[in-house]
């Protein structure tokens, strides 16, 4: 920044005058500020537009310190500042044409994605542009902290004073309400030879700092403990009665099985909410996919190892979860570690075959979405999930457009990106009404909103609504929604919204913590913690995991989803807004019917029902599929009320669902079970659900048949109905008295009955007494 000589002299004289006056007029000085001369653009510099915060219009600039007045500098000048420089592509028009073609089904290069290195080589930034920009930054006193192999971003560190001088700006302190921040009040200027390469400089302000939504949790530990304790005891009786003497039964292990299923969602829960057939959809588990998680906090690996053990994955799975530190990393786990754990645990549950890379950066100090996203791109992840945000009213046009520019590179490389839409409805994290978050606003990523999912019998899809927990006790949250103040409506949203601006969310999935999942965190209660976790911090990694399954079954990466899924809105591939009693503004296209979405994306038609591919799956008491079982099947009480469910899913040889087929379920000969209904027609997801009860203790083998096509399914479902627990008892002696001579005996009869007044055989009974009599066999 240049200043004329007379102005320097005048400023020095003014400071001397103020020093004298300060002795007599301290009150006057304390109320007076001096902003200094306005930075001037010279013939040797070019200013980059869009870098001044709109929020400055209603912010209060803070008074400068006495030191700044008297010496021209103070401690704020030495404050460390990290900037991310986003570079321009050299052939932007060519890049945009490629981006259109690679997502055009009629194009010969449809989904034939270039690598990040090939994109940089073909469209830029060039190596010389990158090197020249870095050299100039170093000449200004900045040090490189994070470069990029595709040359799209440069993260550098310096001081506020060096940033102000280098970019010819004034960086002052401001306040909005109780929130203090620093910001530049003019656009940055650079030498023309450097400015032509630079798209944006992120970090000149710290008003917008990435935050995770407040944890969305529901505590249900007491309820789960009570129910599962009773079940573990009752199931233990049945196990020992069936297994005989010498058998062992692990009450604690069965309690944990019950708890994690009753209090949280198993893999079947979340998958079936999206309608693929259990237990695995087309044998997909995410193998071959790499999911990158954006984090501004960290985690303890022991908590991940505990969760892996809890859900029954191999211990070696921990080797597929890798922390990657960007800009020095986030440091030790802090207040938002549950956010990190929720992201990881969700992917482990839904796509256990995928590799997980956890990219963490410093929560403050200039960590940027641009640097994190670009590092993931150059590391060749296949999917990105992000649940962190700041608000559009906290940032600039240059910031959001440069984030979207980086995400365009992700789309061009075939990388799918998902951002949580937030947990506070149309209000942003900073309390601003009708404001959405960054980077959920980016058109080149998929914004994921929140729903509340209720399941039907046998873990089938029941019903779904837009998540609105504002009336819960305590209030939980709401699925984020709204329109951007920066981005115009993308072409693929035409006809879906009347707004001229980009609308979020694009899609949705379960975010309601009342129907959430458990995690493991030793610092907050162990494994599991006893709380259910939700929010769009759950929805975003859910969609990332779903896409890992889709990529695996497609045989290639889908890349950016929005241009591919919006045309499928009316195809049946989604539980749409109308089915939820909502609208596009709140839930976007809705939640996925994953199998149908796969079928539509591959343009397959459903063939003949395949007996071997179709599935028959049994669910036990209260829909819990992992309760104790004997060789004869899942254990259920023979009370005529405890229900088992059988879910029959018809599919063709390719795993595509077969709706509209009549299915029957038949028990083995001589069985006494009641099966309802007598027959059922498969729904849009190829499912038919049957309820099974029994008043007789007996094993049950159930066979399904597609009556429409005359196809008997290969799989069977098994239940082992066992004697109902005792509900009442009586004890009587044969005679009222007997001589106390050590020889005379009496017989004692204990009778047990269930709640229906029926005998309950097979129970172990022990007698306890006071006095000195001797109890002979049987004991017990």
Image: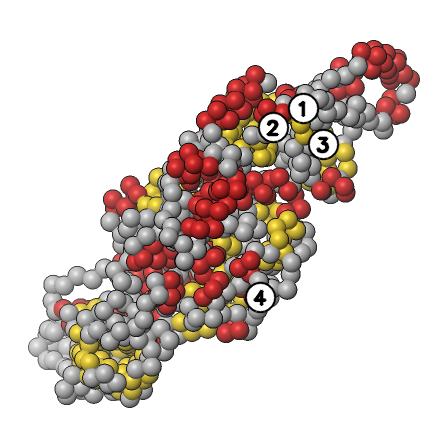
Q: Residue at x 81, y 25 (%)?
A: 34
Q: Specify whether 239 is left or right of 114.
A: left
Which residue is at the front of the view, 86 or 77? Answer: 86
Residue holding disc 1:
45
Q: Is residue 208 above or below residue 478?
A: above
Q: Position of residue 766 (x, y in %)?
A: 20, 71
In this picture, is 319 found above or below 704? Answer: above
Kindly tell me whether residue 324 is visible in this rendering: no
Q: Nearer the viewer, mark 3 or mark 2?
A: 2
Q: Residues within 10 Å of mark 4 (few under 14, many from 20)?
A: few
455 over 66 or under it: above or below? below
| Mark 4 lies on residue | 495
The residue carrying pointer 3 sits among few (fewer than 14), some (14 to 19) or many (20 or more) residues within 10 Å by Cα, namely many
**Residue at label 2?**
195
> Which quadrant holds the N terminus?
top right
Q: Label 2 crowding class (10 Å Cα cut-off): few <14, some 14-19, many 20+?
A: some
Which circle marks residue 186 in the picture? 3
Q: Nearer the viewer, mark 4 or mark 3?
A: 4
Q: Are marks 4 and 2 in contact (CB under 8 Å)?
A: no
């Amino acid at each position: 920044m240049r200043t004329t000589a007379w102005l320097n002299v005048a400023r020095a004289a003014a400071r001397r005058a103020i020093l004298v006056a300060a002795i007599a007029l301290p009150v006057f000085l304390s109320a007076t500020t001096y902003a200094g001369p306005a930075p001037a653009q010279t013939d040797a510099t070019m200013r980059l537009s869009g870098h001044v915060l709109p929020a400055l219009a209603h912010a209060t600039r803070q008074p400068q310190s006495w030191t700044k007045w008297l010496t021209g500098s103070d401690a704020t000048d030495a404050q460390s500042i990290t900037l991310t420089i986003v570079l321009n592509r050299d052939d932007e028009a060519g890049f945009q044409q490629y981006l259109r073609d690679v997502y055009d089904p009629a194009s010969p290069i449809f989904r034939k994605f270039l690598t990040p290195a090939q994109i940089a080589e073909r469209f830029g930034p060039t190596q010389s542009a990158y090197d020249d920009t870095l050299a100039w930054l170093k000449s200004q006193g900045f040090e490189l902290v994070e470069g990029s192999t595709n040359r799209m971003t440069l993260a550098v560190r310096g001081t506020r004073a060096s940033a102000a001088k280098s970019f010819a700006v004034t960086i002052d302190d401001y306040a909005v309400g109780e929130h203090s921040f620093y910001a530049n009040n003019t656009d940055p200027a650079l030498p023309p030879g450097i400015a032509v390469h630079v798209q944006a400089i992120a970090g000149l302000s710290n008003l917008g700092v990435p935050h995770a939504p407040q944890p969305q949790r529901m505590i249900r530990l007491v309820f789960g403990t009570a129910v599962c304790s009773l079940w573990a005891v009752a199931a233990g009786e049945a196990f020992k009665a069936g297994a005989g003497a010498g058998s062992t039964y692990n009450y604690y292990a069965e309690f944990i099985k019950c708890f994690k299923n009753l209090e949280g969602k198993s893999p079947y829960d979340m998958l079936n909410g999206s309608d693929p057939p259990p237990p695995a959809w087309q044998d997909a588990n995410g193998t071959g996919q790499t999911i990158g998680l954006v984090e501004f906090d960290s985690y303890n690996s022991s908590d991940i190892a505990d969760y892996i053990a809890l859900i029954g994955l191999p211990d070696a799975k921990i080797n597929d979860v890798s922390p990657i530190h960007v800009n020095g990393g986030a440091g030790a786990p802090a207040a938002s570690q549950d956010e990190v754990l929720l992201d990881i645990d969700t992917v482990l549950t839904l796509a256990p075959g995928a590799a997980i890379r956890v990219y963490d950066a410093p929560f403050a100090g200039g960590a940027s979405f641009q640097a994190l996203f670009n590092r993931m791109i150059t590391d060749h992840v296949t999917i990105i999930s992000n649940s962190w945000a700041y608000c559009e009213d906290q940032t600039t046009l240059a910031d959001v457009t440069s984030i979207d520019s980086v995400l365009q590179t992700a789309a061009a490389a075939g990388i799918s990106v998902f951002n949580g839409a937030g947990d506070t409805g149309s209000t942003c994290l900073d309390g601003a009404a009708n404001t959405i978050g960054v980077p959920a606003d980016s058109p080149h990523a998929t914004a994921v909103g929140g729903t509340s999912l209720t399941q039907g019998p046998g873990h089938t899809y029941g019903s779904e609504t837009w998540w609105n927990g504002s009336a819960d006790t305590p209030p939980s949250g709401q699925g984020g929604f709204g329109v951007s103040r920066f981005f115009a409506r993308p072409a693929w949203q035409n006809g879906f919204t009347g707004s001229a601006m980009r609308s979020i969310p694009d899609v949705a999935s379960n975010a309601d913590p009342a129907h959430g999942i458990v995690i493991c965190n030793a610092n907050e209660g162990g494994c599991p913690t006893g709380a259910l976790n939700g929010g769009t911090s759950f929805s975003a990694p859910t969609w990332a995991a779903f896409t890992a399954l889709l990529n695996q079954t497609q045989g290639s990466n889908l890349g950016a989803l929005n241009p591919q899924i919006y045309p499928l809105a009316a195809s049946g591939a989604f539980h749409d807004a109308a089915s939820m009693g909502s609208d596009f503004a709140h839930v976007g296209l809705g939640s996925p019917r994953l199998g149908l979405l796969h079928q539509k994306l591959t343009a397959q038609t459903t063939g003949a029902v395949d007996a071997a591919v179709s599935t028959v799956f049994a669910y036990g008491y209260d829909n819990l599929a992992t309760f104790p079982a004997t060789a004869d099947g899942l254990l259920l009480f023979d009370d005529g009320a405890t229900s088992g469910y059988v879910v029959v899913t018809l599919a063709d040889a390719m795993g595509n669902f077969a709706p509209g087929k009549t299915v029957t379920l038949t028990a083995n000969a001589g069985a006494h079970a009641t099966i309802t209904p007598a027959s059922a027609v498969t729904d849009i997801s190829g499912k038919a659900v049957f309820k099974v009860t029994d008043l007789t203790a007996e094993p049950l083998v159930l066979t399904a048949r597609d009556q429409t096509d005359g196809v008997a399914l290969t799989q069977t479902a098994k239940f082992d109905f066992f004697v109902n627990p005792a509900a009442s008892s009586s004890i009587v002696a044969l005679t009222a008295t007997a001589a106390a001579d050590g020889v005379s005996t009496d017989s004692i009869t204990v009778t047990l009955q269930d709640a229906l007044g029926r005998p309950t055989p097979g129970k172990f009974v022990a007698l306890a007494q006071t006095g000195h009599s001797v109890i002979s066999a049987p004991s017990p």
